[in-house]
Image (spheres, helix red, strand yellow):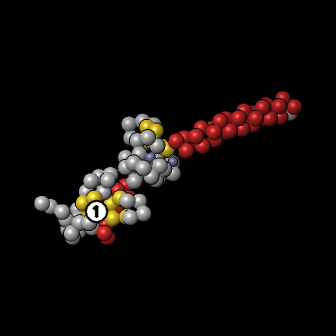
Amino acid sequence: MPNNCSFCGERARFKCPLCSRLVCSTHYDPSRGLCIGCVEALCELCNGSLSIARCIYCGRLGCDRCLVQLDNVRRACRECIKVRVLRIEEARRGLERLREVTLRHFKHA
Ligand SMILES: [Zn+2]
Ligand SMILES: [Zn+2]
Ligand SMILES: [Zn+2]
Ligand SMILES: [Zn+2]
């Protein structure tokens, strides 16, 4: 019966609840209760699921619940999307104001 650590082959003492790999104490993170592989691959946004990709804006790892698919290859986290949508709104309003000022300036000139 194989009960060796999936990472180093030492005698395993824990079983990761997320990936169900057997791991030794050096490859187990007791504070999270997960194996090292899962800790590294964990979603940095909710810390509850395995990540599937990185946010193209902030570069954080995210799971399929925390990331929104933008197109075939790009994904962004909900936080960045919210911030960016706000920024785009602000930028558009700023541009409109600039155009108004420029138009007024040219009329007077
Ligand atoms: Zn190990
Ligand atoms: Zn694991
Ligand atoms: Zn997540
Ligand atoms: Zn992000």
In the image, what residue occupies the spot 25% across and 57% down?
21
Please identify the residue farthest to the right as the structure is shown: 108
In the image, what residue occupies the spot 31% across and 69% down?
25
Query: As displayed, is residue 24 above or below residue 42?
Result: below
Please identify the residue farthest to the left as the structure is shown: 1
Please identify the residue farthest to the top as the structure is shown: 107
Left-right relation of 51 to 4? right
Residue 96 vs residue 58, the one in the foreground? 58
> What kind of residue is marked 1?
Phe
Residue 89 placed where, x, y %? 65, 36
Does dot 1 land on a helix, a strand or a loop?
strand
Residue 71 placed where, x, y %? 42, 36
Left-right relation of 87 to 59? right
Residue 8 location, quadrant: bottom left
Left-right relation of 68 to 27? right
In the image, what residue occupies the spot 43% across and 37% down?
69
Query: As displayed, is residue 101 above or below residue 31?
Result: above
Ligand 2 closer than 8 Å to the CB at disc 1? no
